[in-house]
Image: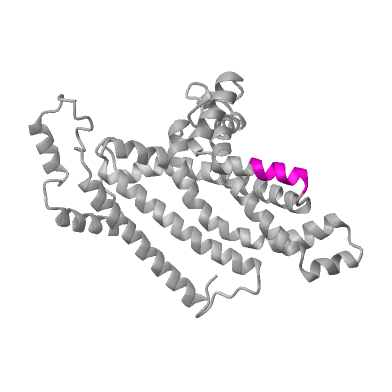
Amino acid sequence: MTAWLLRRLAASVAIVFAVLTLTFVLIHLAPGTPFLPSTDDRSVGPEIIARLRRQYGLDRPLPVQYLKYIGSVAHGEFGESFSQHRPVAQALADAVPNTVLLGIAALVIEFTLGIALGAYQAARARRRVDAALSHLTLFFYSVPTFWLGLALLLVFGQWLRWLPVGGVSDPIVHDTLPWAGRVFDTLRHLVLPACTLGLVGAAGTARYQRAAMLEVIHQDYIRTARAKGLSERRVLLRHALRNAVLPVITLLGLSLPFLLTGAVLVETVFSWPGMGKLAADAIFSRDYPVVTAAAILAAAMVALSSVVADLLTALADPRVRLGDGDAA
């Protein structure tokens, strides 16, 4: 177990290092000037741009910049943001909690709704309700996240005016509210972006859970449980679902990349001040340090989530062993 964990952590470090290298090279080779995003903007003279490039070390050869950046990252420093004029670590510290909050809410929606729908479909397989839900989940799974976000924003934010259309809180009254009021205000702003990410993920989870349940339902121990006279509900919930939900744990490691990539668009649509929006704004402004640091953090989160998913699978299923020569 210990040897397996050390190997996985070493592999995770290698993956993060590869992402760092690839992102650093690509963002520096991409066309555009960090301090002059628009080619039509002539408000900044070439002498000022040259001075800023010297100030941030961009006039040096790319290998020299890369080695210097590696050394800074090794000491926990990600440089200074070109566009925000503050340390990148501070910008990430302000954005990451919002992305974590959005991701947790989306995961709760995804797995709670997805597992429930999948189990319900499997219990009524090949009936009309199963076919209808299959078409519905396929529709949501095929819908781009930004399109669904715009649709939810238009219906519930613009037409019905039930929920706020953007931001993480009301900038006017949030600070004047009591603690419970501030929590409720944040939750109201969280509903639309979390549902946008969660509904798309729940559609895929439901289809995966349905297939897993159908495979388990025909096992011998399920027939034995029915022969003992147990109710169908108890057979499905206590015996079938308990074993069919184990493969879904693997989806935890696969869901985080989807959440991070989807968050870039969703946070932009809903003006949610998270890591996705920060990275998107940094790309358009050619903010090299922010883009690279966001990629490093995203890669680390994905690699860590994969390890955690394997550990959860081993804990949930005693038959799985994470030792030498074995991997979940």
Above or below, comparing residue 74 to residue 185 in the picture: below
Q: Quadrant of the C terminus?
A: bottom right
Residue at 76% across, 52% down: 125
Query: Where on the picture, by quarter, is residue 46?
Result: top left
Q: Does residue 324 lie above or below 227 as drawn? A: below
Residue 184: x and y in percent read: 60, 31
Q: Main secondary structure of the magenta part?
A: helix
Q: Residue furthest bottom?
A: 324
**Residue positioned 21% across, 41% down in the render:** 31
Image-quadrant location for residue 162:
top right
Image position, residue 25 (x, y; %)? 24, 52
Q: Nearer the viewer, residue 262 or 142?
A: 142
Q: Nearer the viewer, residue 174 or 126?
A: 126
Residue 300 placement (x, y as % from top left): 41, 57
Query: Residue 298 vs residue 123: left or right?
Result: left
Residue 134 belongs to magenta span = yes
Q: Is residue 221 left or right of residue 323?
A: right
Outermost residue on the left side: it is 47
* Residue at the spot 48% in from the left edge and 40% down from the top edge: 98
Q: Nearer the viewer, residue 187 or 278?
A: 278
- Span of residues in magenta: 127-136
Residue 62 seen in the figure: yes
Considering only vertical position in the picture, is 172 above or below 48? above
Query: Visible in this render: residue 199?
Result: no
Residue 85: x and y in percent read 26, 36
How many numbered marks does the figure carry?
Answer: 0
Residue 258 falls inside the magenta stretch: no
The residue at the point 89 percent across, 61 percent down is 230
Q: How is the image coloured?
A: one colour
